[in-house]
Image: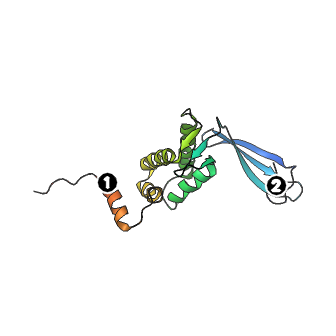
């Protein structure tokens, strides 16, 4: 593994342990050239996924991109980071087990929104605002109105 600080390719593993509910391995590494320490993660990848964008463009699935977008929607929310990691791993496993290598970005967005709705409604609305491309406050209002159960009739 190449050192991110000096570029040395001869780094040493100092410690390995299971992470994310035993679906990945966390490795602490040390660079003898510069003394830098860093962490890497090793995960099982069942198949190479390709995302089909709405404009028809194809790009390789990027777990880090998925994770960034989810973590942005979860910023400053009272959700344990390990719970977020489990959710992301669950989403990736679901995508890999769909049996197809080409997956529409719309399908990925729907799966993410479904997972966020179960964990945190604020993060769900944040993600939806980007995913559904909200343009005005009315878009938020309409979306949140759909989330709320109808109020009982007043007598």
Q: Secondary structure at mark 1?
A: helix
Q: Nearer the viewer, residue 30 or 142?
A: 142
Q: Nearer the viewer, residue 128 or 10?
A: 128
Q: Nearer the viewer, residue 60 or 42?
A: 60
In this rendering, position of residue 55 left or right of residue 32: left
Q: Which residue is mark 2?
A: 3
Rendered residue at 56%/33% (across/down): 97
Q: How is the image coloured?
A: rainbow
* Quarter containing the C terminus: bottom left
> Quick one: label 1 or label 2, which is nearer the N terminus?
2
- Relative to residue 39, is residue 133 depicted above or below? below
Task: Point out residue 83 in the picture as x, y percentages from the top left corner.
Answer: 53, 47
Task: Point out residue 14 in the picture as x, y percentages from the top left corner.
Answer: 80, 47
Q: Which residue is mark 1?
A: 146
Task: Point out residue 128 in the picture as x, y percentages from the top left corner.
Answer: 44, 56
Q: State the image quarter where residue 38 is shown.
A: bottom right
Dot 1, crowdedness within 10 Å: few (<14), some or many (≥20)?
A: few
Which residue in the rendered view is the most extreme toward the right?
33
């Amino acid at each position: 593994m190449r050192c991110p600080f000096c570029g040395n390719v001869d780094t040493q593993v100092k410690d390995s342990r299971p992470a994310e509910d035993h679906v990945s391995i966390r490795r602490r590494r040390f660079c003898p050239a510069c003394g830098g320490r860093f962490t890497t993660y090793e995960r099982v990848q069942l198949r190479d996924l390709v995302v089909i964008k709405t404009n028809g463009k194809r790009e390789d699935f990027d777990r880090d991109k998925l994770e960034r977008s989810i973590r942005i929607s979860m910023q400053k929310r009272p959700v344990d980071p390990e719970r977020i990691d489990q959710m992301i791993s669950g989403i990736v496993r679901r995508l890999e087990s769909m049996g197809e290598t080409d997956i529409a970005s719309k399908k990925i967005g729907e799966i993410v929104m479904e997972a966020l709705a179960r964990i945190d409604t604020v993060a769900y609305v944040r993600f939806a605002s980007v995913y559904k491309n909200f343009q005005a406050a009315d878009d938020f209002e309409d979306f949140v109105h759909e989330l709320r159960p109808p109020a009982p009739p007043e007598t």
